[in-house]
Image (cartoon, grey):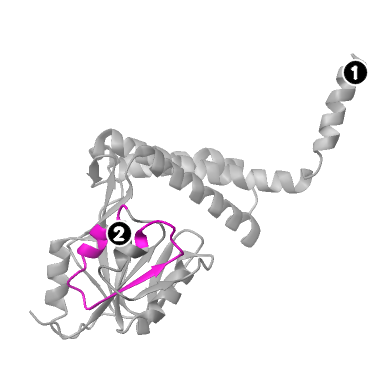
Amino acid sequence: MTRHTKISAVVITFNEEMKIERCLQGIDWIDEIVVADSNSTDRTVEICQRYTDKIYQVPWPGSTAKKRQISDQYTSYDWILALDADEVVTKELRDEIVTSFEKVPEEAAFGIPRLEYLSGRFITAGGWYPQYKYILYRKSMGLWEGGPVHLKFATTGKIGFFKGPILHDGSPNFKIFMDKFNQSSSVEAIHDAVECGRGFSLWRAIFKPLERFFSRFVLRRGYQDGIHGFFMAAVIGLNYFLREMKIYEFHYLKKHHGKWDEVYKSITVHKNGD
């Protein structure tokens, strides 16, 4: 089956030797594969060379949105499928794309549902699925936008949707899932405090985590995924708590920076006085 419109796949990598091959195998039908690596030190580049010679080193520019925008410049075609190394295109999605691209699509982008994998099972509730990602798009019809963590392809053109999912192996176990949200809470807290000038709110620290947990586990039926769903909803709530407390810490240390000696001396003097 011949497609009228050609597609480039852009895969972002950094030390992904354990996952990159299955990602590339899932797009071996696509017209062009471009890999945007960030100086991997493992076998990532070696594995990628089996599937494409279009491998470019793109140093980390400060955000995923910027890296996507830079990486898209290396493609030969206007239509791009943007993937991470831990994502796999399913056969169902492949067939939908092939059929839709037999003619020139009217859309500027397509939303694709992403099915999350966590510690032995795929997650189907709690707001995690379907979680549409606009990762098949015409680069001439929009651009990547986003903050330090979240990003999206922004376009004013028509949006279409596919039913077939991509599979996402971003968190193989509970620890990695929690570590990711701990890290993201640090990045978002600095962004909120420095770039947005936001201060600490005790109200948000108390009630926002509870609201997020209730939304994920009850309203979005995270309970359907059992203890996995409970854990994920709890970590989402914890993420908001940590984010707020790290904002507090940032402002507190900014005011009290360099006062260790004073605190230390006061304790020492007090003890000597006793």
Q: Quadrant of residue 21?
A: bottom left
Amino acid type for the residue under numbered disc 1: Asn
Q: Nearer the viewer, mark 2 or mark 1?
A: 2
Image quarter hosting the C terminus: top right
- Residue 199 in view (yes/no): yes
Q: Quadrant of residue 221?
A: top left
- Seen as rendered, the residue at the extreme right is 273
Establish if 231 lies above or below 153: above
Kindly identify the residue that appears in the image at 21 percent across and 68 percent down.
27
The magenta-colored residue range is 18-44
- Mark 2, Cα crowd under 10 Å, few <14 / some 14-19 / many 20+, is many
User: In the visual, does 99 lie left or right of 190?
Assistant: left
- Mark 1, Cα crowd under 10 Å, few <14 / some 14-19 / many 20+, is few
**Residue position marked by numbered label 2 in the rendering:** 20
Kindly identify the residue that appears in the image at 45 percent across and 65 percent down.
38
The picture places residue 18, in percent across and down from the top left corner, at: 31, 52
- Residue 133 in view (yes/no): no
The picture places residue 257, in percent across and down from the top left corner, at: 77, 45
Amino acid type for the residue under numbered disc 2: Ile
Question: Is 263 a magenta residue?
Answer: no
**Residue position marked by numbered label 1 in the rendering:** 272
Q: Quadrant of residue 215?
A: top left
State the CA–CA distance, disc 2 to disc 1: 62 Å
Image quarter hosting the N terminus: bottom left
User: In the visual, does 75 lie left or right of 197?
Assistant: left
Which type of secondary structure does the marked residue at label 1 adopt? helix
Question: Is 20 a magenta residue?
Answer: yes
